[in-house]
Structure formats: C-alpha cells, structure tokens
Amino acid sequence: MSETPEIAGRQPIEMSVEPGRSYWWCACGRSKKQPFCDGSHKGTAFSPVEWTAAAAGQAWFCACKRTARQPMCDGSHKRLPA
Ligand code: FES
C-alpha cells in the first residue's frame, strides 16, 4: 500500500545542527514538531528517517515531504500544486 505524506510546509525548515548528533526527520508530515518526528506516524506507512550531522552548522530539512534527498530539501516544494 502506498500513501502520500502530508505537506507539513511549503518551505524547507532551517535548523542548527550539532556534529555527531542524530536527528529523526518526520517523513509522514503529521508531526507537530516539524521537521522532526513526534510519533504521529503510528498507523501510517511511514517511518522517521535518521540523519546524523557531519559538522556543526545550518541544515535545511524538507517540510513538504516530497524531497528525493531525504531528509534535506531538494527544491521539490517549488513543484507542489497550489
Ligand atoms: S511523526 Fe512523521 S515520521 Fe514520525
């Protein structure tokens, strides 16, 4: 069964990340703690995606949940229907 994730936002979410730390990106779009998982995917076909920061700095996490480069933005939000 395939499901379409919800659109949590139409712009990427910029976050400060710490080197070596793991982040759990919400893939389903239902989390209230975007861009990260809050457990709301239960009962859906989605699971959070783990990502570990290689270096300190800023990261742009996908909010539309359509990226092909999970969990980072790849510009797919620009092609969302209005
Ligand atoms: S709440 Fe969306 S993947 Fe967990």
Image: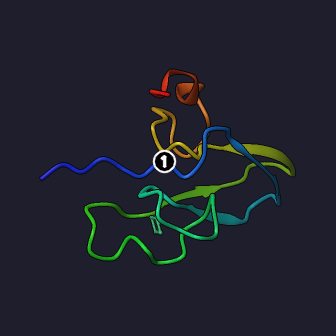
For the point 60% across and 25% down, the residue is 75
**Residue 16 location in percent, x, y?**
85, 55
Q: Residue furthest front?
A: 82
Q: Residue furthest top?
A: 79
Which secondary structure, mark 1?
A: loop
Q: Residues within 10 Å of mark 1 (few under 14, many from 20)?
A: some
Measuring 26% from the left and 74% from the top, which residue is drawn there?
A: 43
Q: Can you say whether 26 is above or below 59 in the image?
A: below
Question: Is 7 displayed left or right of 52 in the figure?
Answer: left
What residue is drawn where x is 55% and y is 46%?
Answer: 71
Is 36 drawn above or below residue 1 in the view shown? below
In the image, residue 60 lies at what x, y percent? 72, 42
- Residue drawn where x is 80% and y is 58% of the image: 19
Locate residue 40, reporting x and y percent: 44, 75
Report which residue position mark 1 lands on. Answer: 7
Badge count: 1
Residues 43 and 58: in front is 43
What's the residue type where badge 1 is placed?
Ile
Residue 37, by quadrant, is bottom right
In the image, is residue 67 above or below residue 40? above
Image position, residue 22 (x, y; %): 65, 65
